Image: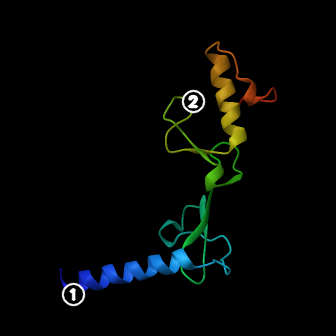
Amino acid sequence: MSNSEELRKDFQGKIAELQANCKHESVTDWMKPDFLSGIPTIEFKKCNTCGKIIARRTKCWACGNWVEEPNWIQGDGSEKIPIGTVFCCETHKRLYAQTARALGKEVPPWIGRNTGTF
C-alpha cells in the first residue's frame, strides 16, 4: 500500500469516527449539491461540525411538494409509475388507486376513498 493510500484510509477512518460520535447540533439550511446546481429538485442538510449529510429531500414528480428521504417512494418502472421518479405518499396512493381501477381491481382500503386521478 502506498503512502497516499495509507493516508487516505487513515483519514477516512477518522472522518467516520468523527461522524459516528458527533451530536449534529449545528446543521446547515437546505442546500443544493454543487454538482447538481442546475437541478432544483434535490436538496440536503449537513452537519457543520463533521460534514455528514443529515437529511435529504426532493420534489414529488407529480405534485411538486418537497418530500424528505424516509418518506419518499421511488417509481417501480411500471407504465404508470416510471422508474427514476420519486413520489410523496399521497401521490403514490393516487397512482396506485388509478392503476387498480384501470385494471378492474379492487382498491385496497389503506388507500382511502379520496384518491382522484391525474
3 on left or right of 47: left
Front residue of 107 and 16: 16
Residue at 71%, 51% (x, y): give it. 65
31 on left or right of 63: left
Q: For the C terminus, which image quadrant?
A: top right
For label 2, the residue is 80
54 on left or right of 93: left
Q: Position of residue 99 (x, y in %)?
A: 63, 23
Q: Is residue 76 visible?
A: yes
State which tag comes first along the sequence, 2 or 1: 1
Residue at 71%, 32% (x, y): give it. 94
Front residue of 15 and 53: 15
Circles 2 and 1: CB atoms closer than 8 Å = no
Q: Position of residue 62 (x, y in %)?
A: 66, 42
Q: For the N terminus, which image quadrant?
A: bottom left
Residue at 38%, 78% (x, y): give it. 12
For label 1, the residue is 3
Q: Disc 2 residue type?
A: Lys
Answer above or below: position of 45 versus 71: below
Residue at 25%, 80% (x, y): give it. 5
Q: Position of residue 113 (x, y in %)?
A: 81, 26
Q: Position of residue 47 (x, y in %)?
A: 60, 77
